[in-house]
Amino acid sequence: MTLHPASPEAEDRIDKLAAASGWLAGGVTLVMMVAIVREVVGRYFFHCPSDWSLELSEYMLVALAYLGAPYTELTDGNIRIDFIYGRYTPRVRAWADIFINSLAMLWSGMLVWQGWRLAWESWQLGARSSQAMAWPLFPSQVLVPIGALLVCLVLMLKIWRSIRFLAAGGKR
């Protein structure tokens, strides 16, 4: 079965993928919270700090940001100047959304490209962190292009929905 890029099935899959990404980011947040609480309790109450907690939290912060971005974009969770945007007519808002989302897609596309180059180089070199745990860099670095690609898909979907709105004469 092939999906037409503008088909309801394709739209539904992108929506579900972005939502799943948001749930993953939430899970990462919980694991990061447990690691930080463990570090605080171990350090201040038992005088037993860990080598891994801070470093793990740094990598998980990358996961949180890049896995949470597609869901945030899908739900319009980004900051917008509502007192200006809200004064536009729905048609002008659709045109503004097309323009802004196109620019955001260019930026996200650059993140996919450059993020993948960096992650691939780390994979080939077997690059590791310079901190105590010396964890491989590739797993956290590959989350940048994955998250940016998901954001690109969401942005394409939002552009398509705005174009469809304009083509329907400004009716939802």
Image (cartoon, grey):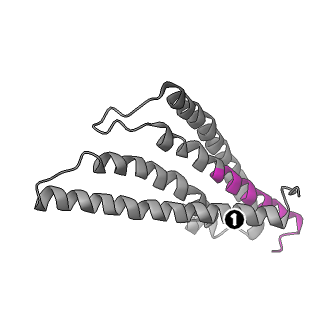
Residue placed farthest to the bottom in the image?
Answer: 172
Above or below, comparing residue 120 to residue 90 in the picture: above
The image quadrant that residue 110 belongs to is top right
Instruction: Locate residue 142, reporting x and y percent.
Output: 54, 41
Identify the residue at horizontal 47%, vertical 29% (top origin).
126
* Amino acid found under the numbered disc labelled 1: Asp
Left or right side of 89 for 136: left
Above or below, comparing residue 133 to residue 33 in the picture: above
Query: Is 162 part of what is drawn in magenta?
Result: yes
Name the residue carrying label 1: 15
Chief secondary structure of the magenta portion: helix
Q: Quarter holding the C terminus?
A: bottom right
Instruction: Locate residue 14, reporting x and y percent.
Output: 71, 60
Left or right side of 35 for 107: right
Identify the residue at horizontal 63%, vertical 35% (top origin).
113
Residue range corresponding to the magenta coloring: 150-172
